[in-house]
Image (cartoon, rainbow, N blue to C red):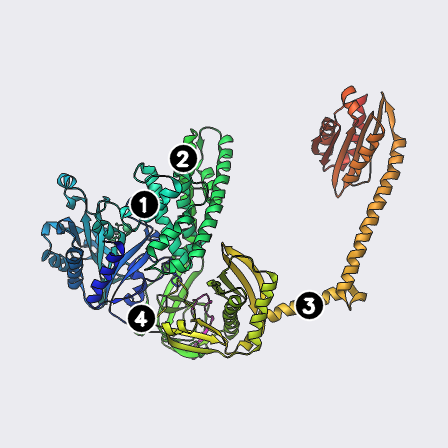
Amino acid sequence: MKSREIRKQFLDFFNDKGHAIVPSAPMVIKDDPTLMFTNAGMNQFKEFFLGNKAPKNNRVTDTQKCLRVSGKHNDLEEVGKDTYHHTMFEMLGNWSFGDYFKKDAIAWAWELLTKIYKIDKDILYVTVFEGADAEGLPVDQEAYDLWKAIVPEDRIILGNKNDNFWEMGDQGPCGPSSEIHVDIRSEEEKAKTPGKDLVNQDHPQVVEIWNLVFMEFNRKADGSLEKLPAQHVDTGMGFERLCMVLQDKKSNYDTDVFTPLIREIETITNAKYNKEEEINIAIRVIADHVRAVSFAIADGQLPSNTGAGYVIRRILRRAIRYGFTFLNQKEPFIYKLVDTLIKQMHEFFPELKKEKNIIVNVIKEEESSFLRTLAQGLVLLDNIISTNDGKIISGAKAFELYDTYGFPIDLTALILEEKGYGLDEEGFLEELEKQKNRSRAATKVETGDWEVLIDDPIEEFVGYDTLETQVRLTRYRKVASKKEGEMYQLVFNITPFYAEGGGQVGDKGYLESPNGDVVYIIDTKKENNLIIHLSKNLPKNLNDTFKAVVDTKQRNRTAANHTATHLLHQALRSVLGSHVEQKGSMVHSGYLRFDFSHFSKVTAEELTQVEDFVNARIREQLPLQENRATPFQEAVNQGAMALFGEKYGDLVRTVKFGESIELCGGTHVKNTGDIWHFIITGESAVAAGVRRIEAITFDAAKEYFANQTDAYNQVKAVLKSNATDPVKAITALQDENIALKKQVEQLLKDKAKGLKTELKAMLEDVNGVKFLATKVALDQGSIKDLAFEMGNEYNNLYLLFASENDGKVMLTCYVSKEMVKEKNLNAGQIVRELGKLIQGGGGGQPFFATAGGRNPEGIPEALKKAKDYIL
Ligand code: ATP
Ligand code: MG
């Protein structure tokens, strides 16, 4: 069975059981401070489990793009080395939100695997939670009994808390789980060791395929458990592992999910899969990582130096490095695999095809730049080796190479080994640990339990219509981090505060108690669909009704920038072409930033056209036309562009100004006239094929003009008499300056000529040498000219000039070539020795040399000693 049919059968099966099929959420998570990437199917439903929002369907099923490379689930180091962990994989799942529970979940899982997919029952094992005394948790008897009715008892294995109790995080929903494992070993091997003994023992052919989680509890900050008001089912099955079983293979990489990629890698690199383990690992790493990176880029996450972007960069670099070392690839090649990947996946994941250009270009560019880093690292490593005492390279040096230059440590170790050197690995790990601790301490956040005052889980946002309203506090909790100190997170029944999202910053403002006390709201963020207001302190009386007031000035500036961002998007598509797509945006109160796909620098003329376009829309005074509940498809039909990597509901908000229409949850001006004016302040590259424009509007534009005017007036004031036409005046000054420079040069030349005559008269005959040692008041260039000119006139010359310029003392020595030979005079040696007298050093050639120093007091002595060389 082909993988695409396997996927379809799963979804159809649960659809028949009343589950709505929903799309995969983006793999890159944007609005959740607790998670960078989706690492399980349940992530997108967290808000339902937490009770922050009611689901539309209480049974859903999907396949979810997951990435396990950071945080709690990090499989990166396993990937490629084993045959069943990936960085990016699909997790098939079915969910019950307070609907069915263990009975149906277990029965359906078994039915699907054994009846529909027809997996032989004799290769399946199931696990059940054995309980945990310390937590007062009993064995999951209910699950055990349900399994016992369909599976022989010797195939049911009790598992500990580590394997069979699932938790969302340190706090939050959790519960026992029941896993299904497969044993796909050969009959001989099965005869040797029973499969039962290998479950959860990291055997590559006795692996977990499906995890059924029964969410029963909520874990509080103090570690205690409380029963959830409603019970849920959350299941996750690894799609690639399922394909391995159904296609009768021993490795995920031998299924049709991966073989096209592996064939392509073989073709490009001339390496053969399944010959040598080192090469196999490299091929698997590359086949896996190109998927993770392509999907991430399609979801809008470009490689970068921070956060999620850095994680993506590291994955790609791991692939490049394996190709470099084990497949001998010194030129970019991974980008060439994208075509094959797209062919394989585009039916189910159309975003790949749509974003192909960006994916290919970004990967290629990253490859080139990291290959340069590798080449540079090799040179640095050679340097370290050649200057090292002994045969062991210290951990600190290897760490610097790793941390500052991005040079992979395993590559360092390998090269050192080849050259007969050792690496202090422990020292390296210590350095790494130190760095991790530093960043961990800086980012660690301690979160308290929610204190619930009013049971009102749905917090209504009214901030599109009003900036001030009466609110009640429904819950709050304390959070503490080293970086930001202690803070409170407040949740209200209703709020005018916009939470950071869609690139727009969160609102600031204050809460006022009836008695006039004020608590400042310093930021507003969203977490699992909950609007959270941050404050440094709590109101005195928590049960008051407060007046909640948004900082109008900041909000208005931000709104102007947000609307301008839409107009900018429209302008770019009109001026540059419809290939322009939004790749990111940042809307602050002070400025806006917009990233978009475009393959060359935007020219000055184009920028002017874009600016003019936006300003024309501003002058047209277009009113805001918004619709908060447009069916998604209708919005798209109207011309609004859905961004990959964004999560949209069935009903979306559309924001329209004239011809500009966008899907947007942000806050906007009522009329484009309120933007006042739009000025582009910068254009730059973010990545291959992605440009960035920065701009300002409204107050910031006014300030910009005021500053420009001010500067202009100052220029005029400085120019005094020529104030009417400063450009003309400045040009005249520049011309005058050029003329004066020429005059000065001429004068200096004349002076040097006069000086030459004077100095010639001062030459002394000492033992057949024409000698002069004296101080001259010339710059270094003129001294050199002078010495050489005099040298042209004599063939037995020996000169030592001393000069002082800007506190710097110089000695210049000239010796005719003939004297170098006959008298054994050496200008280089002379300045080195005499240079000491002026606390300096220098050198040069035997016939001409200079020394610079700091001690003018030494000049007379140096001049005196010069003669000693010919006496
Ligand atoms: P394992 O112990 O094999 O790492 P897990 O306990 O981490 O698995 P879960 O978190 O329960 O797995 O995820 C549900 C299912 O997703 C697993 O049963 C497995 O089929 C699949 N899965 C988990 N991690 C990966 C991965 N890195 N690559 C591919 N599939 C995975
Ligand atoms: Mg795991």
Q: Earlier in the sequence, mark 4 or mark 3?
A: 4
Q: Amino acid at mark 3?
A: Asp
For the residues labelled 2 and 1, the Cα–Cα distance comes to 19 Å
Q: Earlier in the sequence, mark 4 or mark 2?
A: 4
Is 810 or 66 nearer to us in this picture? 66
Q: Is mark 3 within 8 Å of ligand 1?
A: no
**Residue, disc 1:** 78
Tell me the crowding category of disc 1: few under 14, some 14 to 19, or many 20 or more residues within 10 angstroms, Cα based.
Answer: some
Which numbered mark, 4 or 2, is in the foreground of this view? 2
Label of residue 53 in the image: 4
Residue 456 pos. (x, y %) = 31, 74
Label of residue 414 in the image: 2
Q: Amino acid at mark 1?
A: Glu
**Residue, disc 3:** 710
Is 848 or 600 nearer to us in this picture? 600
Whether residue 338 is visible to the viewer of this picture, yes or no, is yes
